[in-house]
C-alpha cells in the first residue's frame, strides 16, 4: 500500500492535467483522447511505482524465494482500468475524467490490447501474474516484447483476413525500458574443448534488452514485474557498408536481430517447427536465466543454494530449453559438476502441460536443434543418457531423443521436479496417455493444478452491475477471497435478490445489444437467450456442431412458423490460425448461415447469429457479462481445462457442456442440476472411435442432421458457390474425428432443455445465481496458492 494519501477526484484531475502538460507536452485545450488516456495512465502509474519498489525491496531484504514464470505468451489485454480497480480508484478516475468533460469509456477504450498471446495459455499467464501480485508472492514474468501481437481479424465476404497488430505504434505508458538489463544471446556456431571442458562458440549473437511492466495486485499491497525481452543488434549499424552506399546491407544486422521479437506465432495448437520459433524460445529462456543467475549471484548466494531461492515455471514446453540452458550455465560457465547441475536444475524447474493434442506437442529435429544450439543438443543427449542410467528399466521407446527428434515434453518432464496438468481430468489423461511410462518411473511427479481466473478483471472490472449487487449483499472483500461468494446462497431464496440479479444481467445484455447494433448493424432482442461461444477456432472446440444445431433450429422454425419459440441469439467470436483451412471454412459457414437466417422474414428476431470480428480480451470483457448460456462443447478429452467456461459461470451464465476439462469440476461445484450436460465422456469417445464408420452411423440415426448436411451440400447458404462446403460435408460423413455427428442429437436435445428452462424465469435466475455463488474455487488465487504450496515451496510476503 502506498503511503501517499488516497487521491480525490480533484487531486487526481490535477495529476492528469500535469501529465497532459508535462508528459504529453500538450495544451489541455488541444489534447486528444490519446493524450488524456496516456495522462491518466501515467497518473495511475505514479501510484503503482512505490508499492512496486517496496515489494522488490522486501523480497531482497528478507531474501525471499522468487518465482520466475517463463512464457512465450502473456495475453494481458488493456491495463489502465485493471490498475484502477486494484488501486481501488476506478470510481475516482471516472469522476476525474468526467470532471474534465471527457467520456470515461472513450478514454479507456482508446488503449490497445496487449495481445501478446493466442488464447488460453497466454491469458492464464496474465491472470497468474495478477494473482501472484495479489497474494504477495514474489514473482517475475519473463516473455517476449513482440512488436506485433496476435493478428487483427476482419471479415471480407465472410472470410477471415489477417492484418498485423501494432500495439506499439503509440507509446506504451505501462512499460519502463531497462537498457542496463541487456544480455547477449548466442546461436549456431560450434563447440570446442578448452582444457578438457566443452566451450560453445556462437556463430551469431543478438542483444536481449529488458522492458519492465509493473503488475499491481488487489488493493495495491504488492506489485511484481513482467519483464519482456526485445531483440536488438549487438552491432548497431554497419557504417562501412553504408559509406559504400550499400544501405540495405548496412541495416541488415538490425533487421535480422529484430526478427526475433518482431511477431508472435499465431498458431495455438499446431507445432510448426520453424527455426525462427526455436530461436524465439531460446532467446526468451536464455535472457531470463542469465538475468535470474545475475540477480541470485548479486545477493552473494551460492549456486548450490539456487533451488532454495529460485523456482522456475515453464508455461508448456515452449521454454523447455530452460533445462539444458540452466545446466549449461551451471556446468560449462560456472563449473558445477554436470550431474549435480542436472539435479540442481530439476529442483528449480516445474513444467505445466496445457494440451494433449498430438499436433501441438513440440519435437525439434535433432539436426535443427544441433545447428541452432549445438552445445544444447549435446547436453540433451547427456541428460537422456543420465536418465537412462538412473532408470535401467526405462522402456526403450521412452526418452527425449527418438527418431532424430528432440521431444520437448519428455525433456521438460525429465528436467522438472513437478509436472502439472490444468484440470483434474486432464491430469489423469496425462498420466494415462501422454506420459504413462514416465509416470511409473516418477510416481508423484505429475500433480494437478486446476486453472483459475482473476475475479478482479473478470467480475469486479468487467461486470460492475453484478459486482455492486454482490457488494450490496455481502459487502466488499470477496474480490480477494472468492469463496466468500458462497455467502450469496442464503439470499438466493429471496426473489427480490434474484430480480436484482437478473436486472444486472439485463443491463449487460442491453449494453451489448447497443454495441452490436452500432458495430454490426444487427438488432438483438434482450429477451432472447444470449447464447455465446467465444474461443479460438478449432475443430475440437466444435463450433461446427453449434452452427449445425442452429441450422436445425432455423429449419424447424421455418417448418412451423406459428409455433411458440424461445428467442435465441447465437454469438460467436474467435480467430483461426492463418494456415488452418478447416477452421477458416467453419468461420465462413457461420457467416454464410448468419446472412441467410438474419435476413429470413419468416424468423424475425426469434433467431439471430452474430460473429463480431477480432475477438480479444477486451471483447471478452464486453460479451461475457451479457451471456445467459456458455457454450463449452468440446469433444471430451480434448480441452485441457478451458478458462472461458469459468468466466461465464462466474458472471451468472449457465453452461451447456461436455464432461471435458474443467467443465467436470465446474459441474461438481455449481451442482449437476445447474448445468446442462450432454455428450460422450472421454472414455466413450475412445470407445466410439473404434468404429471406423462412427460418423456415417451417427448421421444415419439423425434425420435432422442429414437434412442439415444436405442443405449445406446443396449450397443453401452459398448459392453463389453451391460446392463451397462439399469438403466439410464429406469430412462429416467420412471422418468427423471430433465426433460432431455422434454428439449432435444429445447436444440438440440439451439445447431444447435450455429453451424450456429459460422459460421458467424464477428457476433460471436461481440456477444462474447459484453458478456465481459457487465459483469461488476457480479463482486464480486458489490456483496460485496451489503452485506456491505444491511446486514452488514459497509463501506470501504479505
Ligand atoms: C506450438 C504451438 C502451440 C502454441 C500454444 C499452445 C497452447 C498450449 C494452446 C493453449 O492455449 N492451450 C490451452 O491452455 C489453456 C490454459 O491452460 C487451457 O485452459 C485450454 O484448455 C488449452 O487448450 C499449444 C501449441
Image (cartoon, rainbow, N blue to C red):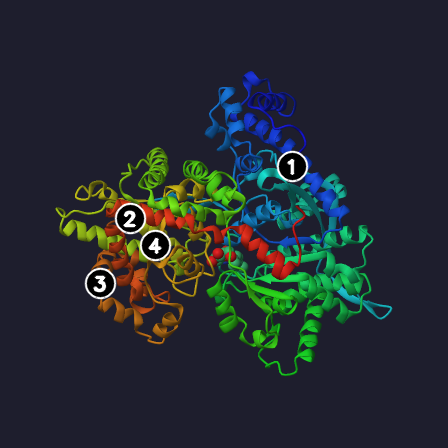
Of the numbered discs 3 and 4, the one sitting upstream in the chain is 4
- Quick check: can you spot residue 470? yes
SS at mark 2 in the image = helix
For residue 129, side relative to residue 669 (left or right): right
SS at mark 4 in the image = helix
> Cα distance, mark 1 to mark 2?
43 Å
Please tell me which residue lies in front, 353 or 29.
353
Please tell me which residue lies in front, 103 or 131.
131
Q: Which residue is mark 2?
A: 763
Q: Which residue is mark 3?
A: 706
Q: Is residue 179 above or below residue 639?
A: above
Mark nearest the camera among 2 and 3 is 2
Of the numbered discs 3 and 1, the one sitting upstream in the chain is 1
For residue 218, side relative to residue 210 (left or right): left
Q: Residue furthest bottom?
A: 393
Of the numbered discs 1 and 2, the one sitting upstream in the chain is 1
Where is residue 500? Give x, y as percent.
Answer: 35, 37
For residue 561, side relative to residue 684 (left or right): left
Of the numbered discs 2 and 4, the one sitting upstream in the chain is 4
Amino acid at each position: 500500500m502506498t503511503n501517499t494519501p488516497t487521491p480525490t477526484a480533484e487531486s487526481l484531475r490535477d495529476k492528469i492535467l500535469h501529465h497532459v502538460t508535462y508528459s504529453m507536452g500538450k495544451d489541455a485545450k488541444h489534447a486528444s483522447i490519446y493524450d488524456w488516456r496516456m495522462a491518466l495512465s501515467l497518473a495511475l502509474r505514479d501510484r503503482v511505482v512505490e508499492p512496486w519498489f517496496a515489494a522488490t525491496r522486501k523480497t531482497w531484504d528478507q531474501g525471499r524465494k522468487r518465482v520466475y514464470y517463463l512464457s512465450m505468451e502473456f495475453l494481458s489485454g488493456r491495463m489502465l482500468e485493471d490498475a484502477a480497480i486494484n488501486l481501488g480508484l476506478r470510481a475516482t478516475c471516472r469522476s476525474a475524467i468526467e470532471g474534465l468533460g471527457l467520456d470515461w469509456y472513450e478514454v479507456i477504450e482508446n488503449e490497445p490490447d496487449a495481445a501478446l498471446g493466442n488464447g488460453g495459455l497466454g491469458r492464464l499467464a496474465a491472470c497468474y501474474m495478477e494473482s501472484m501480485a495479489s497474494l504477495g508472492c514474489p514473482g517475475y514474468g519473463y516473455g517476449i516484447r513482440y512488436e506485433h501481437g496476435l493478428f487483427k481479424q476482419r471479415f471480407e465476404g465472410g472470410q477471415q483476413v489477417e492484418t498485423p497488430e501494432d500495439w506499439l505504434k503509440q507509446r506504451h505508458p505501462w512499460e519502463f525500458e531497462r537498457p542496463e538489463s541487456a544480455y547477449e544471446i548466442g546461436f549456431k556456431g560450434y563447440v570446442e574443448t578448452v582444457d578438457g571442458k566443452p566451450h560453445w562458440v556462437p556463430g551469431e549473437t543478438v542483444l536481449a534488452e529488458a522492458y519492465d511492466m509493473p503488475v499491481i495486485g488487489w488493493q495495491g499491497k504488492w506489485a511484481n514485474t513482467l519483464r519482456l525481452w526485445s531483440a536488438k543488434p549487438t552491432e548497431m549499424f554497419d557504417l562501412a557498408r553504408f559509406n559504400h552506399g550499400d544501405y540495405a546491407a548496412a541495416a541488415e544486422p538490425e533487421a535480422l536481430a529484430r526478427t526475433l521479437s518482431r511477431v508472435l506465432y499465431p498458431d495455438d495448437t499446431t507445432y510448426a517447427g520453424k527455426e525462427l520459433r526455436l530461436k524465439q524460445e531460446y532467446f526468451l529462456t536464455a535472457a531470463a536465466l542469465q538475468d535470474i543467475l545475475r540477480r541470485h549471484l548479486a545477493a552473494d548466494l551460492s549456486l548450490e543454494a539456487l533451488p532454495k531461492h529460485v523456482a522456475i515455471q515453464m508455461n508448456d514446453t515452449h521454454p523447455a530449453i530452460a533445462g539444458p540452458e540452466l545446466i549449461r550455465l551451471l556446468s560449462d560457465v560456472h563449473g558445477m559438476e554436470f550431474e549435480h547441475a542436472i539435479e540442481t536444475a530439476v529442483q528449480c524447474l516445474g513444467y505445466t502441460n496445457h494440451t494433449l493434442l498430438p499436433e501441438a506437442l513440440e519435437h525439434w529435429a535433432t539436426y535443427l536443434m544441433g545447428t541452432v544450439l549445438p552445445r544444447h543438443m549435446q547436453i540433451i543427449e547427456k541428460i537422456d543418457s543420465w536418465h537412462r542410467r538412473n532408470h535401467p528399466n526405462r522402456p526403450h521407446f521412452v526418452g527425449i531423443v527418438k527418431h532424430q527428434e528432440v521431444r520437448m515434453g519428455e525433456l521438460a518432464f525429465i528436467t522438472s521436479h513437478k509436472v502439472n496438468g490444468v484440470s483434474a481430468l486432464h491430469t489423469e489423461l496425462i498420466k494415462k496417455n501422454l506420459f504413462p511410462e514416465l509416470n511409473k518411473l516418477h510416481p508423484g511427479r505429475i500433480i494437478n493444478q486446476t486453472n483459475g481466473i482473476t475475479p478482479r478483471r473478470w467480475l469486479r472490472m468487467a461486470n460492475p452491475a453484478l459486482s455492486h449487487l454482490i457488494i450490496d449483499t455481502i459487502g466488499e472483500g470477496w474480490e480477494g477471497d472468492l469463496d466468500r461468494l458462497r455467502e450469496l446462497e442464503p439470499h438466493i431464496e429471496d426473489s427480490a435478490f434474484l430480480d436484482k440479479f437478473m436486472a444486472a444481467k439485463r443491463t449487460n445484455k442491453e449494453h451489448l445489444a447497443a454495441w452490436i447494433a452500432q458495430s454490426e448493424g444487427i438488432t438483438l432482442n434482450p429477451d432472447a437467450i444470449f447464447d455465446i461461444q467465444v474461443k479460438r477456432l478449432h475443430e475440437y472446440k466444435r463450433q461446427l456442431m453449434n452452427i449445425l444445431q442452429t441450422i436445425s433450429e432455423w429449419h424447424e422454425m421455418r417448418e412451423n412458423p406459428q409455433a411458440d419459440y424461445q428467442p435465441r441469439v447465437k454469438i460467436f467470436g474467435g480467430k483461426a490460425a492463418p494456415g488452418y483451412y478447416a477452421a477458416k471454412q467453419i468461420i465462413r459457414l457461420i457467416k454464410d448461415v448468419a446472412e441467410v437466417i438474419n435476413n429470413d422474414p419468416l424468423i424475425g428476431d426469434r433467431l439471430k447469429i452474430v460473429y463480431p470480428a477480432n475477438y480479444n480480451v477486451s471483447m471478452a470483457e464486453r460479451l461475457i457479462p451479457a451471456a445467459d448460456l456458455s457454450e463449452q462443447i468440446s469433444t471430451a478429452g480434448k480441452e485441457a481445462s478451458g478458462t472461458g467456461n469459468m468466466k461465464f459461470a462466474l458472471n451468472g451464465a449457465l453452461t451447456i457442456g461436455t464432461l471435458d476439462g474443467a467443465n467436470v469440476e465446474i459441474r461438481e461445484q455449481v451442482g449437476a442440476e445447474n448445468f446442462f450436460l450432454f455428450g460422450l465422456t472421454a472414455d466413450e469417445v475412445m470407445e466410439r472411435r473404434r468404429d471406423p464408420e462412427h460418423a456415417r452411423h451417427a448421421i444415419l440415426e439423425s434425420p435432422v442432421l442429414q437434412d442439415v448436411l444436405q442443405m449445406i451440400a446443396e449450397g443453401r447458404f452459398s448459392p453463389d458457390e453451391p460446392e463451397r462446403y462439399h469438403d466439410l460435408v464429406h469430412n462429416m460423413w467420412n471422418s468427423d474425428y471430433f465426433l460432431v455427428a455422434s454428439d449432435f442429437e444429445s447436444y440438440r436435445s440439451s439445447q431444447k432443455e435450455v429453451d424450456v428452462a429459460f422459460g421458467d424465469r424464477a428457476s433460471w435466475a436461481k440456477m444462474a445465481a447459484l453458478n456465481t455463488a459457487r465459483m469461488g474455487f476457480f479463482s486464480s488465487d486458489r490456483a496460485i496458492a496451489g503452485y506456491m504450496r505444491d511446486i514452488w515451496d514459497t509463501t506470501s510476503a504479505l
